[in-house]
Amino acid sequence: MPNKKVLNHHEIMVWMRFRTKLLTMALILLLVPSTFVISITITGWQREVGNKTKEGLLNLVEGKAEYYDLEFYDIRNTMEITAFYIASNWGKGTYCNTSYVWIAPDSGDEEELEQDMKNYEYVMQAFESMAQGKNKVKINLMFLGLENGICFLSDPEVVNILERDAPTFDARERIWYTLAKEHNDTVWTPLYVDVNTKQLVTTISTPLYVDGEFEGVLGFDMLLATIQDDILDIQFADTGTPMLVGRDGHIIVHPEYTAEGKAWNESFEEENIYNISALAALADEIRNGSTGIQEINVEGERQYAVFSTVEEINGSLLFLLPRKVVMESINDTIVDTVVFLLLALLLMGILVMLFTSSLTRPLETLQKAAREVAKGNLDHKITMERNDEMGELSEEFNRMVEELKKARRELEESEERYRSIFEESADVIYISTEDGKIIDMNRAGEKLLGYTREELLHMNSGDLYANREDRERFKKEIEKQGFVKDYEVKLKRKDGKVLDCLLSTTMIQRGDATYYQGVIRDVTQLKETQRQLDMYNSLLRHDISNRNQIVLGCLELLKEEGNLNEEERKLVEKAYEHMANSQQLLKKLAAINKIQQKELKRMKLADVLQWVGEKYEPLAHEKGVRITVNVKEGCVMADDLLENVFSNIIENALKHSGCKNIEVDGREEDGMMVLTITDDGEGIDGEIKGDIFKWGVKGKGSKGSGLGLHLVKRIVEGYGGTIVLKEGEKGTTFEIRLPSC
């Protein structure tokens, strides 16, 4: 048997080292391409998962922004309906509970305050209706501030707080009042410290107009904490920073905002993303109302910044999420997968594909669901049995869909309430386009005009005018100020009957479109009654005047030819004086009647004043008074009653002031003729200065009716002008402003 060669220890070690090197080389040769394949696969997979995650985040934020838009729109819509209800019932209240009313220092006339406070009845009805609605949790306090200093509050405890902590509180000076009045629209205020809760609040407020006249501002307070906790509850994996940012860059709502011990009358400065270097790059996107996602660096940490517009606040929802939170789970899985693939190279491809699919499938499911919701299918839900971030994201998506469904239901209920008010109104309420197409009209309109709703919706409002040219005149009038009040028109029913009506209409701007919304009131019967009253009034004045003239003639004969002693003569003269005053009173009543029937024309001031001066020259000469008229030119839109304006003032000065000079001056200023009538007499008694233009007010010792200056004021205001009593050291000065021709 041949001898076998026995390997010694050294040879064995060499063989072992060679085998190890061989295996190592084989493993390296296998690992290099495998690692390259793994690297490419994982990189592509990581990129795909990252893209899907970004899409999911963007869909989530877009959905949340739409939900917030609906929430804020519903609050604004509810507020405007509440304001409409209050305005519709303005002046109908009969009582007031002063526990709910705050009156600012230096408020208006006491009688006016007392009358306006009676609106408490319907204001509180509106507040109580709000307190029972769906927004009661979001709204902290409701209030209505008036231009005369009155403020109605939904909580009487706030009145006690104001008396204790803020006795100088004036609603007219608060930002929610000044902003709504300045913009003449519904506004959201910047954050400020609430005098009631001492916390940060924002207020949605809207101006209140009654018959086209500004009365005050209606406001609803929302605590910042409520918005932070109840509305801005968006999160991803229990983290993330949501905020609301205005188009101007101001951060309206931020989770870290607090009052910081500020007093109610101190301002709160909001941060601005233009001043935050990490967020400044997003400013242009938010200003332009864009939707998107960017990766930014915040204090050395990479974060996703997801933004989507919220039109109701004229801003955007901005959500910051650390990138590591999104990628952490993915990266952990990648490490495990790489280790596993290195241990089982043969299964690497299959495992990577399966794992990639397991991650991307939920995101694709989420993306598909988001597209369904975007189409309006709010019954679509995601069923995903997972305990990771994808599971949380699907649950958050389902909650968002439920909130959208709830918001849609509540919006429908809100629209039903508005429709109820619209349909049950006794007056005709209508909405039309600027060119006259009727958008909507309530049942009162069908009854008044004799058409069905279907017929009205296929008509142009110009078809309802007895004279179609009146529609064009109406358009020109409403374009001047944006509204008309009690504008007289003649409308034609379906059966051809012509109706006298009053239009009170407001121009509404919605984007690029203009609409007219208003009330039509039938005054046909009222005008007929007024015509009969005017006829009886004219006949009665004519008969009384004729009888007065007979009596005056008899008294004149008795004075001249009667054999009277001194006492009898005085009695006759006194009777004559009273009858003459009666004739003057009839003339003033006739003038008052003419005010309501005015037809304005171009009148030269110099001609009118020359005639008045000549008329009173004999009386002025008798009393030693000099009348100087310094008006050589100027034209105003007036009628024959303009002479009464100047005659009344000059006659009063001649008879009652004890003056020696009366001077009339005029000038043109900003499209108005400004006339001043000044005397150097004793002036008007200080006790009646504030009431000099009121009905029946007259000076001590005056034998007049007290109608003169009241009549003057009504005539001037009927021309679209003003008259005021100016303060001076001596004498009396009246300033009259009349529109120039």
Image (cartoon, rainbow, N blue to C red):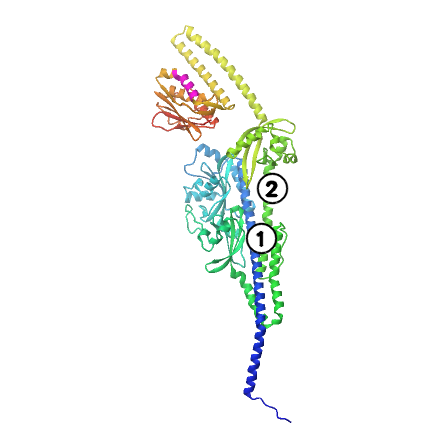
Q: Which amino acid type is marked by label 1? A: Met
Q: CA distance from mark 1 to mark 2?
A: 24 Å
Q: From the viewer's perspective, tell me whether residue 212 is left or right of residue 667.
A: right
Give the residue at x 50% y 22%.
594
Label placed on residue 400: 1
Compared to residue 422, the image places residue 51 above or below, namely below
Q: Are marks 1 and 2 in contact (CB under 8 Å)?
A: no
Q: Secondary structure at mark 2?
A: helix
Q: If you read the primary sequence from the N terminus, does the residue marked by circle 1 or circle 2 appear first? A: 1
Q: Quadrant of residue 568?
A: top left
Quadrant for the N terminus, please. Answer: bottom right
Label placed on residue 416: 2
Per the image, is 612 magenta? yes
Label placed on residue 143: none
Q: From the viewer's perspective, tell me whether residue 713 is left or right of residue 524.
A: left
Q: Main secondary structure of the magenta part?
A: helix
Q: Which amino acid type is marked by label 2? A: Glu
Q: Secondary structure at mark 1?
A: helix
* x, y percent for residue 717: 47, 27
* x, y percent for residue 258: 45, 52
Q: Which residues are magenta?
A: 606-617
Compared to residue 639, the image places residue 46 above or below, namely below
